[in-house]
Image: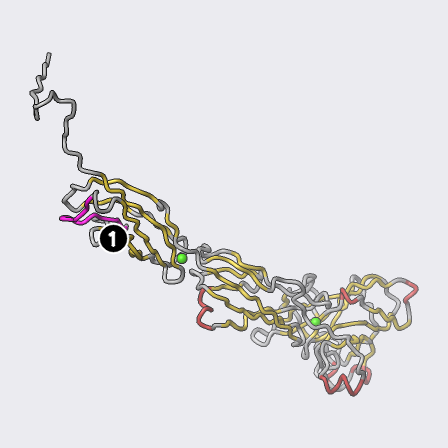
């Protein structure tokens, strides 16, 4: 009921806790409503409504209808109250100055508007043909918010406004940096004891701020997901829930991301080589993996025991895999040293892992023949091939 004198306009933020109206002789269902006008289009949107049954016992007197907290409509300054009757108009009205004079008492109506769901929009409202009409219709509001000053002044113990709460939603989480892009990390949502309150939850802060780019927060579903590889360390994300009247609550979700270290897939291992190999020889291709989404692993020889320059690490030809090689023109000697232990380090710059590779030296056996007759140092071998 939009009138020039704004008799039906709501002046503050809160919830409709009761409706009062004078019932005439009609019975049926009264839908006590709150409407909001779009600044952009001028159309009216149904905020919500309370269905009230009118029986003959209600006739010809004021009916006061307290609304259960679960059904209280959240209102904003500038909203308007209105109603719909299932049949003939249920609340009584009177015509000021016999319907003559100021147009400030005129109201709008629609015969075709039957939106029943909150958020429905109607564009069919027109001026009611009966002029200078006033309806006996009143909404009582419970507070949506009080300033601290007002609280203290009027009722220090009044806690009738309800701020949003994040409840027991996850305060922290822990994942490794191999977490696939798009993974759901947590669901962050808030509630409000005002059952019909409209909460807006925003992701309002990230520490360190540089990490903000790897997360996405869906305000509708509350889903916090990854959009890129996660940086190791702890990131704190702050969320703010705001209710219809501007009461806020904040919640911090702390995510710890740990590095997935490199893994040797084929070490430790050993090999045996003859002391007389004189060309560069590949002894072992290392398979080292790292599940982290963005890590590059580098490897090096930490130590050779005993020290030697005959063994080294380089890329296997045409690959990015490290391989252990024996140098051409090496000085391996079975009689001097029969075992070398290489300690290999691989790092992703965050964690270094270590494994060993052992090289055993074999004697180059010359063909020495024993059991020869006394005085002979050689014999003739006859081969018969058939
Ligand atoms: Ca609230
Ligand atoms: Ca890693």
Count of picture labels: 1
Name the quadrant of the N terminus: bottom right
308 to the left or right of 246: left
Residue 275, percent from left and from top: 19, 42
Q: Which residue is mark 1?
A: 313
The vertical placement of 343 against 384, above or below, is below
User: Residue at (34%, 49%) from the top-left corner?
Assistant: 356
- Position of 97 with respect to 3 (left or right) is right
x then y, percent, for residue 37: 63, 74
State the residue lying farthest toward the front. 374
Q: Which residues are magenta?
A: 322-333
Residue 190, x across and y down, in percent = 64, 65
Magenta residue check for 323: yes
Between 335 and 117, the one lying in front of the other is: 335
Which residue is depicted at the point 19% across and 45% down?
333
Res 32 → quadrant:
bottom right
Q: Nearer the viewer, residue 7 or 283?
A: 283
Q: Position of residue 352 (x, y in %)?
A: 38, 58
Q: Nearer the viewer, residue 176 or 264?
A: 264
Viewport quadrant of the C terminus:
top left
Observer-nearest residue: 177 or 12? 177
Residue farthest toward the top in the current orientation of the protein: 386
Residue 213 part of the magenta-drawn span: no
Which element type, helix, strand or loop, lies under badge 1?
Answer: strand
Q: Residue at 64% x, 73% y: name it.
A: 249
Q: Is residue 215 left or right of residue 125?
A: left
Mark 1 CB in 8 Å range of ligand 2?
Answer: no
Ligand 1 in which quarter: bottom right
């Amino acid at each position: 009921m939009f009138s020039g004198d704004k008799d039906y306009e709501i002046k503050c933020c809160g919830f409709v806790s009761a409706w009062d109206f004078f019932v005439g002789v009609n019975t049926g269902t009264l839908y006590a409503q709150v409407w909001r006008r779009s600044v952009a289009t001028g159309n009216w949107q149904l905020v919500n409504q309370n269905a009230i049954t009118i029986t003959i016992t209600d006739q010809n007197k004021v009916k006061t209808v307290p609304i259960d907290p679960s059904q209280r409509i959240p209102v904003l300054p500038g909203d308007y109250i209105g109603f719909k009757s299932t049949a003939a108009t249920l609340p009584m009205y009177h015509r000021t100055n016999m319907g003559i004079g100021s147009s400030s008492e005129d109201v709008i109506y629609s015969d075709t508007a039957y939106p029943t769901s909150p958020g429905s929009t109607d564009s069919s409202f027109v001026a009611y043909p009966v002029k200078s009409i006033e309806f006996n219709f009143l909404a009582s509001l419970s507070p949506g918010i009080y300033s601290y000053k007002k609280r203290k002044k009027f009722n220090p113990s009044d806690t009738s406004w309800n701020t949003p709460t994040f409840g027991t939603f996850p305060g922290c989480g822990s994942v490794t940096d191999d977490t696939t892009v798009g993974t759901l990390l947590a669901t962050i949502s808030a509630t409000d004891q005002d059952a019909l309150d409209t909460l807006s939850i925003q992701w309002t802060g990230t520490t360190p701020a540089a990490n903000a780019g790897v997360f996405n927060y869906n305000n509708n579903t509350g889903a916090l997901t990854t959009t890129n590889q996660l940086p190791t360390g702890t990131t704190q994300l702050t969320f703010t829930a705001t209710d219809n009247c501007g009461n806020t609550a904040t919640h911090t979700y702390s995510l710890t991301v740990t590095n997935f270290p490199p893994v040797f897939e084929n070490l430790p291992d050993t090999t045996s080589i003859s002391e007389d190999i004189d060309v560069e020889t590949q002894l072992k291709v290392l398979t080292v993996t790292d599940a982290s989404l963005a890590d590059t692993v580098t490897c090096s020889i930490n130590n050779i025991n005993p020290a030697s320059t005959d063994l080294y690490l380089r890329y296997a030809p045409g690959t990015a895999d490290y391989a252990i090689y024996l140098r051409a023109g090496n000085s391996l000697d079975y009689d001097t040293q029969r075992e070398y232990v290489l300690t290999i380090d691989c790092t992703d710059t965050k964690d270094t892992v270590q494994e060993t590779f052992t090289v055993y030296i074999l004697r180059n056996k010359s063909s020495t023949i024993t059991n020869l007759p006394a005085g002979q140092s050689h014999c003739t071998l006859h081969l018969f091939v058939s």
